[in-house]
Amino acid sequence: MKKGRKERSSGLVLTDDNVSNMKQIIGQYKNVLVCGMVGVGKIINTVSALQEHSDVFYIGNPVDYEGKQRPGSYEKYLAYITSLKQDLKVVDAMEDLFSVTSSIFVIIDEIYGRSKKQLEQIGRLLDMQNIRCIQIVGCVKYMGELINKIDIIVVLEQSGAFTIDKEFGKAICKVLGRN
């Protein structure tokens, strides 16, 4: 190892198999931020990584990372997402999860366009010890202060995945997230 390089202690070994990458990351971290280019499979790979679990909840968003309506309609998008995992539970109201005491996984689809109240509710979910959150975003910059509650940031690509330093993620939010 070259002098000055830091060795990662997490033991993550990411490959070109993003389902395996996501399983590994979700298995080691509580609050995961997943980003990447359009069409890279952020949702597909995340849901596929959670196939073995029956306690998976999904919080959708009718708009994408640019604030555009989902192609076709939001209902068609939801139908597609739920077809990926037959027992995926769609959450209509985030506050319904605040009383859950069992250990669950929550996939939160996109941050862009969410109200102040929804952002506060997402923050509360990220703080709950029994909930493992996977936040999907098109662009890290929209995370704002919620970036501070994230344990790891993973970028998916067609050919694999890599992680980015949390401090770098915070800087992206601070500099690029300004309106």
Image (cartoon, rainbow, N blue to C red):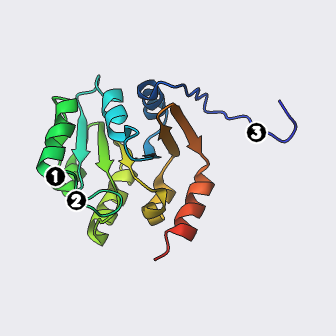
Looking at marks 1 and 3 on the same chain, the residue that comes earlier in the sequence is marked by 3
Q: Which mark is residue 6?
A: 3
List the residue tagged with mark 1: 74
List the residue tagged with mark 2: 69
Q: Position of residue 143 (x, y in %)?
A: 44, 61
Real-space Cα distance between discs 1 and 3?
44 Å
Residue 42, picture quadrant = top left
Q: Nearer the viewer, residue 52 or 128?
A: 52
Q: Nearer the viewer, residue 36 or 28?
A: 36
Real-space Cα distance between discs 1 and 2?
7 Å
Q: Position of residue 117 (x, y in %)?
A: 27, 69
Element type at marker 2? loop
Q: Amino acid at mark 1?
A: Tyr
Q: Residue at x 51, y 31 (%)?
A: 160
Report if the CB atoms under discs 2 and 3 are less than 8 Å apart: no
Determine crowd level at label 1: few under 14, some 14-19, many 20+ residues with C-alpha closer than 10 A: some
Q: Is residue 9 above or below residue 179?
A: above
The answer to whether residue 129 shows anywhere in this view is: no
The answer to whether residue 54 shows anywhere in this view is: yes
